[in-house]
């Protein structure tokens, strides 16, 4: 397939890609401020809450390569539309859930159908040139950030009306996006060779393990998501432990009333909203100016460095304004890192297997979102509320060194490729 420039292909297809990723991350983030509520309403302990948080990502880990290879074989359009319809159904179940088993079922379904983010990334690769690849991935990154932004906000604000409201509103978004995709999304991505002959081939994994240009990018992406997902899951618990008055709670969750926990949920959602909005602005706007000036291989060094510095500041904070400084710095690191890594992976992967490799990357990201909350929760319990952020900072210091090595090894070849494009 000959790639097209998105600017020549119209805005509607890219808007569908944006909405698909947005709704996927909306489902991931919507539960963040609701977890303390579930612990009160359904008597869930910390292990159950951690598993509930991780179940969504566990399904994405298992099925992202599946959806990626399905899209390589049959095209991106049916996968994207089907995923949106399935996500709609999972949100409806989420709205009706009145017990932990039903919540788990809803989250598992949402993760299964939401595992098609790699298909959206592959669609970007189909319609963009190599020169514009990072800009296109920035659109995905912006949707990623905005979904994470509005998910916690939606969950926190709507729960004040009803425990069911967040799920039903999210279901409406999914149905609207699926309808729009049905009428507007162009068909693309069906494989013409052997790349789509198997749904779970071993060639993708084999090359990822043997080709260092691909493998190092996958490791860098995994470390970034592992660290950031730990922040997502522990930030509210960290705030309630060290700065409870900031969230309007004067005592621990166990000692607070249900009304107090409900009142804290919107406050938590608003903080996550601001962080996500900044990340989305960087990924959707600033990245377009930074890539031509610095190149992806420089940005993947800056990303983990600034993200790790932000976590270090948050962990060391003794007053809430210092926490806000770290929160302000964090979106820059995350915002420049992910689109650049996705662009480098797309350019290194074979053209006929874009969906498979981006699916593998999405799967590793989902694995990181399973491990991150569990790792952060364990560290939080054993060492204290500061330590999840210190551990994340140490992981990202290692990622920064790895990125420096990647740039030294491959930076020149990417620069030559850009000049030739």
Image (cartoon, helix red, strand yellow):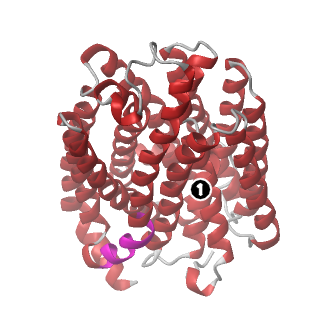
Q: Nearer the viewer, residue 368 or 283?
A: 283
Residue 37, quarter of picture: top right
Residue 321 in the image, given as x and y percentages of width and height? 23, 45
Residue that numbered label 1 is attached to: 22
Please tell me which residue lies in front, 127 or 335.
335
Instruction: Residue at 63% x, 38% y: name it.
Output: 160
Asked if residue 74 shows in the view, the reply is: no
Q: Is residue 286 magenta?
A: yes
Residue 260 x/y as whole percent? 50, 26
Q: Residue at x 57, y 17 (%)?
A: 40
The residue at the point 50 percent across, 23 percent down is 50
Q: Nearer the viewer, residue 296 or 348?
A: 296
For the stretch drawn in magenta, what is the main secondary structure?
A: helix
Q: Residue furthest bottom?
A: 8
Give left or right: position of 365 versus 340. Answer: right
**Front-most of residues 360 and 36:** 36
92 in magenta: no
Q: Is residue 404 above or below residue 40?
A: below
Q: Residue at x 35, y 54 (%)?
A: 334
The number of numbered discs placed on residues in the rendered structure image is 1
Query: Viewed as shown, does residue 127 lie left or right of 206?
Result: right
Q: Which residues are magenta?
A: 283-292
Q: Quadrant of the C terminus?
A: bottom left
**In the image, residue 198 above or below residue 296:** above
Q: Quadrant of residue 99?
A: top right
Q: Is residue 38 visible?
A: yes
- In the rendered view, would you say 152 is above or below 135? above
Q: Dot 1, crowdedness within 10 Å: few (<14), some or many (≥20)? A: many
Label 1: state its secondary structure.
Answer: helix
Residue 217 lies, in percent from the top left, at 36, 52
């Amino acid at each position: 397939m000959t790639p097209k420039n998105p600017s020549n292909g119209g805005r509607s297809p890219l808007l569908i890609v944006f909405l698909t990723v947005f709704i996927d991350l909306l489902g991931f983030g919507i539960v963040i401020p609701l977890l303390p509520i579930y612990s009160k309403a359904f008597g869930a302990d910390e292990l159950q809450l951690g598993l509930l948080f991780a179940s969504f990502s566990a399904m994405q880990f298992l099925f992202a390569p599946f959806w990626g290879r399905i899209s390589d074989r049959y095209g991106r359009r049916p996968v994207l539309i089907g995923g949106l319809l399935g996500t709609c159904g999972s949100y409806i179940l989420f709205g009706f859930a009145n017990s932990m088993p039903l919540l788990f079922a809803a989250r598992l379904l949402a993760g299964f159908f939401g595992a098609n983010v790699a298909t959206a990334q592959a669609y970007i690769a189909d319609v963009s040139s190599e020169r514009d690849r990072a800009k296109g991935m920035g659109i995905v990154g912006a949707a990623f950030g905005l979904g994470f932004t509005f998910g916690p906000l939606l969950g926190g604000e709507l729960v004040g009306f009803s425990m069911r409201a967040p799920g039903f509103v999210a279901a409406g978004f999914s149905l609207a996006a699926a309808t729009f995709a049905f009428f507007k999304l162009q068909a693309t991505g069906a494989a013409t060779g052997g790349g789509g002959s198997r749904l779970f081939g071993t060639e993708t994994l084999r090359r990822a393990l043997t080709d260092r240009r691909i493998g190092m990018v996958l490791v860098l992406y995994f470390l970034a998501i592992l660290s950031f997902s730990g922040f997502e899951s522990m930030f509210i618990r960290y705030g309630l432990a060290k700065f409870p008055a900031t969230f309007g709670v004067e005592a621990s969750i166990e000692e607070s009333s249900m009304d107090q926990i409900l009142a804290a949920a919107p406050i938590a959602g608003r903080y996550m909203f601001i962080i996500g909005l900044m990340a989305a602005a960087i990924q959707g706007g600033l990245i377009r100016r930074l890539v031509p000036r610095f190149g992806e291989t420089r940005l993947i060094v800056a990303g983990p460095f600034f993200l790790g510095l932000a976590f270090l500041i948050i962990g060391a904070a003794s007053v809430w304004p210092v926490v806000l400084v770290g929160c302000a710095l964090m979106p820059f690191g995350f915002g420049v890192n992910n689109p650049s890594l996705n662009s480098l992976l797309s350019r290194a992967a074979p053209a006929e297997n874009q969906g498979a490799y981006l699916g593998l990357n999405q799967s590793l990201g989902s694995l990181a979102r399973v491990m991150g909350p569990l790792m952060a929760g364990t560290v939080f319990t054993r060492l204290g509320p500061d330590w999840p952020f210190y551990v994340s900072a140490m992981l990202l210091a290692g990622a920064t060194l790895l990125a420096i090595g990647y740039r030294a090894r491959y930076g020149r070849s990417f620069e030559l490729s850009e000049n030739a494009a």
